[in-house]
Amino acid sequence: MNNFAFLATRREYRAFSKDCIDAEAAFQNSYDSCVKLVRTAVDAAIKWVYTTEKKLSGMSDDLFALISNPPFEQLIGKSLAKKLHYCRKLGNSAIHNEKEFSAVEAQNCLKNLFEFVQWIDKRYGKNFEPRTFSSPLDDAELLQTELLGMKLSTPIFAASGTFGFGEEFENFVDLKRLGGVMVKCITLNPRRGNDGVRITETPSGMLNCIGLENPGVETFLTEILPRIKDKMNVIVNVSGSSIDDYGELARLLDVDGVAAIELNISCPNVKDGGIIFGTDETQAAKVTSAAKSATSKPVIVKLSPNVTDITKIARACESAGADCLSLINTLMGMEINVHTWRPTLGNITGGLSGGAIKPVAVRMVWQTAQAVKIPIIGMGGIRSAEDAAEFFLAGASAVAIGTANFLEPSITMKLADDLINYLRGCGLKNIRELVGRIKIDNV
Ligand SMILES: Cc1cc2nc3c(=O)[nH]c(=O)nc-3n(C[C@H](O)[C@H](O)[C@H](O)COP(=O)(O)O)c2cc1C
């Protein structure tokens, strides 16, 4: 995008340049805010024309009257005046919350504003050069993809356990711009989680042993899901102590508002479940079939990196009917306080996540992508668009961001913007063109 960036370099346009740039930036987060901000920018630019154009008279505080003022309309032309009216009309309804605006309407407003700014630059600018409007919708299309029968605005997910139930991030993130949110792990009964220290930052990565603290499936279904289901694609991460638990959870969650179920068979932080199913092919297959036969929802199986050969588990899950694989969960780790000689974490060991595990995750996604045909959601240490691009190149169809959300709650949005620029730089039209495109010379 950056249609209005050139204004920032011209001191003479100071009175409205920031408003234009802000309006365009808002498009990424909220079409309503974009429409409102376009109105502010249009008003500022009209006032600027009135102050600059000596022959205009009839200054009034009423912007509607200013646009309709015949000498002004004559100056800019009827058609452009009409476009400015359009922006102001939509802007006013946005301010009064009369309706929700679509991407196309927000884009139309930006386009009209752009035309006006071009007109201004042509008439008053010292170094006018004709520019064409670059559509933010084309930008949005770069990241649009499909997964598990869902049309996604971006292939960027929030990883389970690092994003709460999504609503906690509402003020930082346009939740609809995420492919989906893998909500905090849900179990059949509520869990308090582990005692003692549950998170520690090491010089290279974060260690956690939360221990699957959650309110249980019943509270999730009755209290949480109704609140969040229209705000995002909800992927419910589940964990059980037995194969039957997974089947039961999948059955209970086969309800409206759940987009998919992610089987956490890889939690290294609880004694009674998760990881034992993720480190044994037969168990992994049994858990997958139990869930598949109990639900009509797509089933994603989340794999553990704490295995010798991840492809064996991946194939077993695929054969048992998994629709998708997500990987990796955390790597089992430990830290010892050398002053007290005690482990830092209450649970002694914990799961390592963050930048340090990215090379392991990329390697595992690459190996798994060659072993199975079902799609993969890659995760582990992603902090930037370049990090994410590695996962796509390795064969992931989508990515999830975990630990980085703790450092920067809006990281997923920045990553989406940066990924668009990366794709443009590569000359690609859609993210799907990057999937599995790693180049390896024959050795
Ligand atoms: C504090 C914390 C809690 C987590 N809880 C869950 C969980 O409930 N279920 C799950 O499948 N993964 C859980 N994970 C693993 C993440 O979803 C992700 O797979 C892992 O952290 C790797 O990605 P990252 O390096 O981007 O964080 C958790 C990770 C962290 C850091």
Image: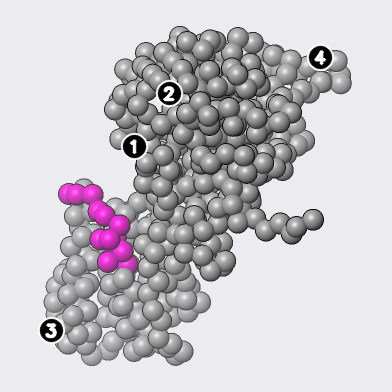
The amino acid pointed to by label 2 is Lys
The amino acid pointed to by label 1 is Lys
| Mark 1 or mark 2: whose residue is earlier in sequence | 1
**Disc ID at residue 292:** 2
SS label for mark 2? helix
Instruction: Return the residue at label 1.
Output: 231
| Mark 4 or mark 2: whose residue is earlier in sequence | 2
Write the start and end of the magenta stretch as one range: 98-110
**Disc ID at residue 342:** 4
Disc 4 versus disc 2: distance between alpha carbons?
43 Å
SS label for mark 3? helix
Q: Is mark 3 within 8 Å of ligand 1?
A: no
Q: Are marks 3 and 2 in contact (CB under 8 Å)?
A: no
Disc 4 versus disc 1: distance between alpha carbons?
44 Å
Residue 442, percent from left and from top: 75, 57
Foreground mark, 3 or 2? 2
Q: Is mark 4 within 8 Å of ligand 1?
A: no
Residue 233, percent from left and from top: 38, 37
- Residue 128 seen: yes
Q: Residue at x 14, y 80 (%)?
A: 69
